[in-house]
Image: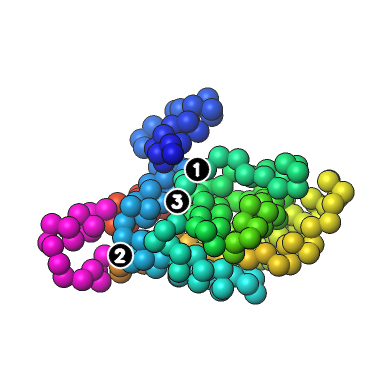
Amino acid sequence: MVSAIGRLLDELSWEGNARKYRGGGVGLENVLTTEVFQALDLLPRTAFLGRVLGAASPVSAGATAAIAEAVEQIEGADVDVLAGDATAADDRVKVQPDALIESSSSYVLVEAKRARGGSFQPEQLARELLVASHQGAGRVPLLLLVLGEEPPIMVKGHGRLSIEDAVRVGQESIEARLGISCAAVLEDASIAHLTWERIARETGAAADGLAAGDPSLAAAVRRLAGTVIDAVSLHR
């Protein structure tokens, strides 16, 4: 598997404008996502990434159970940052997840926005829910939104909307554009959200709560946890 840094460099190579990454790409969501989720992948899973997922706020009826399943399976999960294309509806619906957290029974598609600002395309949430439901078939799928601030969210051309209304806007557009019905899939889909600030707080609390043991190992874990907190602070 290509490393998170390798994926980030590949993405940069396609953009054709490396100047915006000067100074470390401060404020860019793909840089922040890579820094944070690569560290969470490497930290003790239950104590850190499991805790972060467990702090997410459910939006839909099935999200609480989907979060619980993801947390339950977190030790054996694969974390894939900047994972590339994922599709649904015979490849007519395509998204690029910021991260995937997958196990034998759980599928979490992560959509991350900037720590400051950031907006969604009109169809974005509906497309991501369709892809999560399709790719996570036979498992428990979840769309996890990582936001710079609590909802409502900014949707281009529609202003600030609740997450539920943003999904409905996307559903109507997709159905009109592709001539398909996706209401049943979206009604059963699970979605949750949390902020970058909440990720930093939960990571700090997990580091503070480390059990006494090998002091060198504990110091290494705290340093790695510190990179998560520092990244969120830097990109705000």
What kind of secondary structure does the magenta stretch mostly adopt? Answer: helix
Q: Quadrant of the N terminus?
A: top left
Instruction: Tell me the distance, in whole angstroms, between the alpha carbons under discs 2 and 3.
Output: 21 Å
Q: Amino acid at mark 2?
A: Gly
User: Which residue occupies 23% across, 68% down?
Assistant: 210
Q: State the residue position of label 1.
A: 82
Q: State the residue position of label 2.
A: 204
Please indicate whether residue 163 sits to the left or right of residue 199 in the image.
right
Badge 2: residue crowd in 10 Å (few <14, some 14–19, many ≥20): some
In the image, is residue 80 above or below residue 160?
Answer: above
Foreground of the two, 150 or 144: 144
Please indicate whether residue 124 sits to the left or right of residue 200 in the image.
right
Q: Secondary structure at mark 3?
A: strand
The mark lying in front, picked from 2 and 3, is 3
Q: Amino acid at mark 3?
A: Val
Q: Is residue 145 visible?
A: no
Q: Position of residue 209 (x, y in %)?
A: 25, 71
Q: State the residue position of label 3.
A: 79
Q: Secondary structure at mark 2?
A: helix
Q: In the displayed orientation, state which residue is furthest to the left.
A: 215
The mark lying in front, picked from 1 and 2, is 1
Q: Position of residue 142 (x, y in %)?
A: 58, 62
Q: Secondary structure at mark 1?
A: loop
Residue 216 falls inside the magenta stretch: yes
Stretch of the chain drawn in magenta = 207-224
Whichever of callouts 2 and 3 sits on the residue coming sooner in the sequence is 3
Q: Is residue 2 visible?
A: yes
